[in-house]
Image (tube, grey):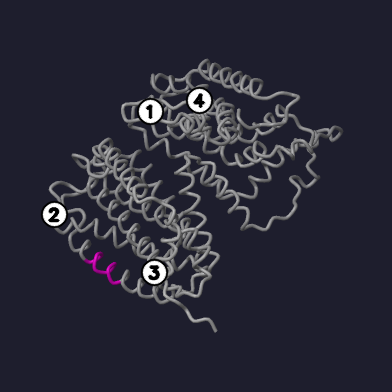
Amino acid sequence: MTAPVAVAGIRRWVRRTQSAHRDGRETLGNVYFAVLFVLIVGGMVHKQIAAVVWPDTPNASMLAGGSLILIIIGVLYLTLRRLGPLALSRPAASWLLTAPVSRRRLLLPSLWVALLGAAVVGAVGGLAILGHVATRPVPGADALLPLVGSLLGGALLLVALGAQADRWWSAWSDNAAYLLIAVGLAGLVVDSAVGAPRADPGWPAAPVVTTLAGALAVVVTVLFLLAVRGLAATPNERILEAAKTSGTLFDSAYGMEPSFVTEMVERRYWARRKLTSRRLWPRGGILFSAAGQHQRRVPVLVAQDLLLLRRRPRRLLWVAAATTLPALLAHAPGWLLGLAVLAGGLVPGGVTAGTIRTDAGNPVMLRLLGLSSRTAIGQRLWVPGVLSGLWYAAALALLQGLGDLPAGPWWALGLALGPVGAAATMRKSRVGFVDNGLMPVDTPMGSVSTGPLLNAFAGLDVLLLGLPTVVQIAVGEPLSWTGVAIQAAVAVLGARAYLDATTKKDRVELSGR
């Protein structure tokens, strides 16, 4: 039987082996660059960060504060679940996870790092809520709210660690986090619509804060002891999955290539599902006319997008809930509200964007189907166009119902924006990898690579077709049917021009357009 060996010695040997070819000056240069980067970025944005966390005067109501608490809890828990939360580096996961070493000692440093990160995020969230809601000066007991936030972040991490071991309640906890986010967003929308009252001078109550801090301290201590005791029982596949996630995020940030993350999310989603062949319609994908004499099939790529929608109903629910987000900017300038509404059309259009990225990266299926790039993009435009049009119509109708828009057929204007959202989604999905060979731009802070910038703004440039809507919202005058007709004409002609300019009848490839 193989006896376990000490982890520390193996780690030191691995570090020495990995760094044997490096010069000491190279390591020192990397540290210098990292510190200099933090100092430069901190010097540029420290005032903005301070204003976000601790504004000069409180500017949020108690309802908004409670809603933000729910959103922070839900988002932090889901983020921890997606990251692991217990993870190792890819070399450690490859060589040390299966080595005869103590798993508890191997995983304990990662647990401490994750616990510290969750506590810091929770403390910043508590400080931000205290700064935006509580009256000034803040009483001494209320200053414990950041401590409560850090303890709550640690508790969420330990709960997520238990869910990582595939407990029976893991899926239930994820659904509860989604529900908290939905309730929090609804609370923010209500606060923006009705103008909830500001917090009283005694908010939050000192006994509540101190009691909550003490209770959370006990809970975190108990959960931490239980987590350390059962640390070795964490499944290997979950640790490997978390290691791949952290490695992919690092590669994406280092190479400024967001497509790595997108591909990882798509692959992981479909790898966990058992799919069976299904027909789109009961009659084999055939739509019959009213007379029953003529029949025509649904285009094959449109049918694929519809099947994808049917297999992902939860995403449609989130798209429907996202129609309330523009209402959060109801009191913002009109041009900002218009831009937010216009950019929101990328959310529903992106529901089926995975199929477009697949076709752009590997057009083999299009060749087998005998479809040209123009035919393929023309069929792919239908489902994103309908979803974007319905989303725009619902968002604008909600804004009008809340009294944030003047009279007029805003729902019709939203439907007219459907082709804009579809074309923007198509443009963003076909952009491909970042071109790092482009000429950099010199700035006072150094050179900036133009490839990632062009990749980030791909799709947003096509949203300029919705400029008539932004102008109409910014002006604030009643909407007429003439304005709807102008926007519809611009959207249809622009989408058609994009289709003709980026596709051909004798070409199959879709990428790089």
**To which residue does mark 2 refer?**
139
Q: Secondary structure at mark 4?
A: loop
Q: Which residues are magenta?
A: 211-218
Picture coordinates of residue 77, whole percent (x, y) = 41, 57
Q: Is residue 193 left or right of residue 358?
A: left
**Disc 4 to disc 1, how far (Cα)?**
16 Å
Is 434 in front, or is 458? Answer: 434
Q: Secondary structure at mark 2?
A: loop
Q: Residue 213 magenta-drawn?
A: yes
**To which residue does mark 3 refer?**
108
Q: Residue at x 35, y 38 (%)?
A: 193
What amino acid type is highlighted by mark number 3?
Leu
Q: Earlier in the sequence, mark 2 or mark 1?
A: 2
Mark 3 vs mark 4: give the one in front: 3
**To which residue does mark 1 refer?**
336
Q: Secondary structure at mark 1?
A: helix
Q: Residue 68 magenta-drawn?
A: no
Q: Residue at x 18, y 56 (%)?
A: 142
The C terminus appears in which quarter of the rendering?
top right
Q: Is residue 245 left or right of residue 286?
A: left
Q: Are marks 2 and 3 in contact (CB under 8 Å)?
A: no
Is 213 in front, or is 26? Answer: 26
Q: Earlier in the sequence, mark 2 or mark 3?
A: 3
What amino acid type is highlighted by mark number 4?
Asp
Q: Dot 1, crowdedness within 10 Å: few (<14), some or many (≥20)? A: some
Determine the main secondary structure of the stretch shown in magenta: helix
Picture coordinates of residue 158, whole percent (x, y) = 39, 66
**Disc 3 to disc 4, how far (Cα)?**
47 Å
Q: In the rendering, which numbered label is found on residue 461?
A: 4
